[in-house]
Amino acid sequence: MENKKRKDQFVVAYLPCARVADCVTAHALQLAEMLKKGVILLHVADSRYGDVSVDEAWLKRLQNELNSRGGDSPHTEYCLLRQPTRKAIAAVGEVLNGVAVVAAVDADAPRHSPTHYKEVLRNFRECKTAYLTVQTNATAATAPCYDRVAFFVDYSKESKEKLIWASYFARFNKSRLELFHYCYRDSGLQLKWHNNMRFLDKLFKGLDIGYCTHAMDVQRTLFAETAVVDAAAACGCRLLISTTTDLRNKDLLDYLLGSSEQHTVRNNKGLPVLFINPRDDLYVLCD
């Protein structure tokens, strides 16, 4: 891969194997076209997953195939790294100038496969960019489409990062935004939620972005995002934006039953999920 200038930015298609290339590259190209970025095909040779020998030729063939499309199709390059996947993914923003990563989740993958949902979440835990997870069995028959984008706003500070990314889809893809929320009865939670909504209104008003709100009944499930998946699918949404659990806020239920993202990433509606890890600083893609 050629040396990158800081002004170059890319959507990174994480390809642990050729079998997931079709669904991952389809979403990476769609996201890159929306954001006016290039695409990098990333393969990581990680001893955690067995043989580290790599047939680099298939990456080059895929690169040539994607670049041969011409027109407005994003320019594609490839990168091969030999290091732990978790370390490589954590550095995509700095090393590859990545603004987002696309990764596959395979429902039939063995537990210690890089496409198993637990391995995906493990490897992306320290990722500083947003990452889009797509289920291989749910995306094979349909082309990527982000015409309706769902997100859940609660009382936590991490919700604000979801709003930034939601605004990207509305501005650059003309997506219709569907906002889901609970009607909190606790006055303290109500106040925190209203603070987030004031931030949302100020941000979206300044960008001339509209959205639809959907009030949900008091939480009936252990994980709010799981309920949002069902409601979003019922509204025809094609993408969910979600924040992962802050490790500092994990409780006993998270360890016993799994955190909310472990359920969301393999949701039974087949919705792609754009995850954002909690950060102390707010990463903004565009000026």
Image: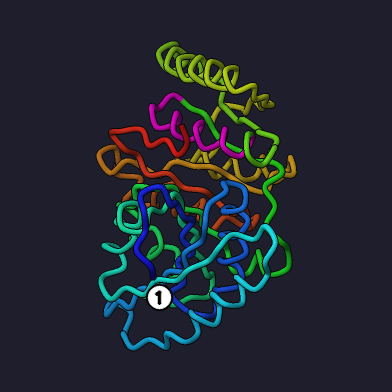
- In magenta segment, residue 135: no
Using the image as rendered, state which of residue 207 and residue 159 is in the foreground. 207
- In magenta segment, residue 158: yes
**Horizontal arrangement in the rendering, residue 130 relative to residue 146 (left or right):** left
Q: Estimate the x, y position of residue 195 in percent, counting from the top left.
A: 45, 15
Using the image as rendered, state which of residue 57 and residue 52 is in the foreground. 57
- Residue 252 versus residue 178 in the image, above or below: below
At label 1, counting other C-alpha atoms closer than 10 Å, the crowd grade (few under 14, some 14-19, many 20 or more) is some
Q: Estimate the x, y position of residue 63 in percent, counting from the top left.
A: 54, 74
The residue singled out by tag 1 in the image is 113
Which residue is found at the position 34% from the left and 63% from the top?
3
- Residue 269 versus residue 112 in the image, above or below: above
Using the image as rendered, state which of residue 220 and residue 28 is in the foreground. 28
Q: Estimate the x, y position of residue 98 in percent, counting from the top left.
A: 41, 53
**Horizontal arrangement in the rendering, residue 105 relative to residue 271 (left or right):** left
Which residue is found at the position 39% from the left and 63% from the top?
118
Q: The magenta stretch spans which residues? A: 155-170
Q: Main secondary structure of the magenta part?
A: helix
Question: Within the image, what quadrant is residue 148 found in?
Answer: top right
- Residue 65 versus residue 118 in the image, above or below: below
Which residue is found at the position 42% from the left and 88% from the top?
55
Give the structural element (helix, strand or loop) at label 1: loop
**Horizontal arrangement in the rendering, residue 249 relative to residue 150 (left or right):** left
- Residue type of the residue flagged with mark 1: Ser
Total marks shown come to 1
* Image quarter hosting the N terminus: bottom left
Using the image as rendered, state which of residue 286 and residue 16 is in the foreground. 286
Q: Estimate the x, y position of residue 101 in percent, counting from the top left.
A: 46, 56
